[in-house]
Image (cartoon, grey):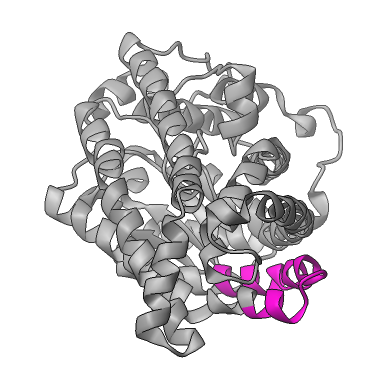
Amino acid sequence: MLCLAPLGVRAGEPLQRSPPHSQVQAQNHAPRADGSPVAVPEPSAKALRHYHESLVLSGARILWMLLAPALFVFTGCSARVRSWAERLGRQWYFTFALYAVACGLIYYSISLPLSYYAGFIHPHHYDLSNQTFGRWLDHYAKGALVVMLGLLAIGWFPFLVIRKSPRRCWLYLGLLAAPALCALVWAQPLMIAPLFHHFRPLQNKALDSKILAEAARAGIEGSRVYEVNMSEDTKILNAYVTGFGSSKRIVFWDTSLKALNEDELLFILGHEMGHYVMRHIVKFIAFESALIVGLFYIVHWLAERLIARCKARFGFDALSDIAALPLILFLVWLVALVGLPIPMAFSRHMEHEADRFGLELTHNNHAAATAQVKLQEYHLGISRPGIIVKLWLFTHPPAAERIEFCNRYRPWETGRPARYGEYLKP
């Protein structure tokens, strides 16, 4: 899922906050006929506190994602749960199912305090959230249930491949990553997202007619634009393109529809259409799939050597043993964390090009820049993060880079051709 969120710890989960609408509108956000540049806003003291606390929470979550499976496997707990599941399950799949459910319940139970603080207490402390505790808990439980059902449905398959081909399993599983990602991206807007929020076609008919005209200029026929009731949970702004094939769509959070003016919304739509016409979802799936093949090779190589050295401590001697699941997860997350700057850089490149497309479609530099300013202000954002934070956590270019690009990119004013003119109709 590709989105407009300025800080990409998770797509669709920015780390920032909103000032009163009247305050934002009173600043430099009204359209200017003179096309004067928009200043990069300096973060408030509150935004700086939120940013640093968010980094600590992100670090804690990453540490916990590594520590939990490592403890589970290195203490032999995984092998003991496997042995318990074998006694009750008897047949292989039922053994796996019991093991998966038991491990899932343990993980989500002990993760609850950190998830509660990071997902409920922290955003409420900074006035980012409208969510009630009951609704937060409902979403937490649904998220856990979706993961556990997915694990029960397909989690057994990698172990079958490992048993059948212990030496080349990493290659076969890596090659299956592309169709698996396509299926997941296709299902997300149709089967997963509606479990948490209500989606409907855009209700503002005047805006919808302008969107259809803009879509026609971008060569997109029959585009699907939805709004989602995120204001039940949050005060932050976002829009994104999601889905694959028949499920592809552009989604606006209702918070964005209320906070941004029409010109800003049309630029954001142009940005999302850029993802659409340049097939960024397909490109990202292909890029991620290639990385996954390499990741699986490294994980397989490390896992085989760790098992050979620590099999007495682990309580299993083969990667095909279901008790190896936490070891696999630990290594996947560790290797992925080390290599995270690679997909993050690719994501930032696509977001930058989507900004370029939005500008070439609308020619409204001021609205594009003020939209970025509002995203930063409503999210308690930081315009110029440190290089390490940018490399590891930002799926989008930092706000300062985006605003400055929106201010200066005007090839049409000097007669230069548009980079993506091939996609645009007169």
Count the numbered circles shown: 0
- Extreme-right residue of the structure: 416
Q: Position of residue 258 (x, y in %)?
A: 30, 44
* Residue visible at 41% across and 24% down in the picture: 56
- Which of these two is toward me, 284 or 291? 291
Is 137 placed left or right of 292 in the picture? left
Q: Position of residue 5 (x, y in %)?
A: 48, 40
Seen from the viewer's position, the closer of residues 125 and 294 is 294
Which residue is drawn at the image coordinates 20% and 33% (left, top)? Answer: 124
**Foreground: 420 or 354?**
354
Range of magenta residues? 160-185
Residue 342 position within the rendered picture, expressed as x and y whole percent measured from the top left? 73, 40
| Residue 114 is covered by the magenta coloring | no
Q: Is residue 100 above or below residue 16?
A: below
At horizontal 17% and vertical 55% (from top left) the residue drawn is 135
Q: Picture coordinates of residue 188 (x, y %)?
A: 48, 68
Dominant SS in magenta: helix
Compared with 326, 132 (above or below) is above
- Is 275 rendered above or below residue 164? above
- What residue lies at 51% left-to-right and 32% top-to-bottom? 367
> As drawn, is 227 to the left or to the right of 353?
left
Q: Residue furthest front?
A: 312
Asked whether residue 283 is in view, the answer is yes
Say which quadrant the C terminus sits in.
bottom right
**Residue 184 belongs to the span the image colors magenta:** yes
* Picture quarter with the N terminus: bottom right
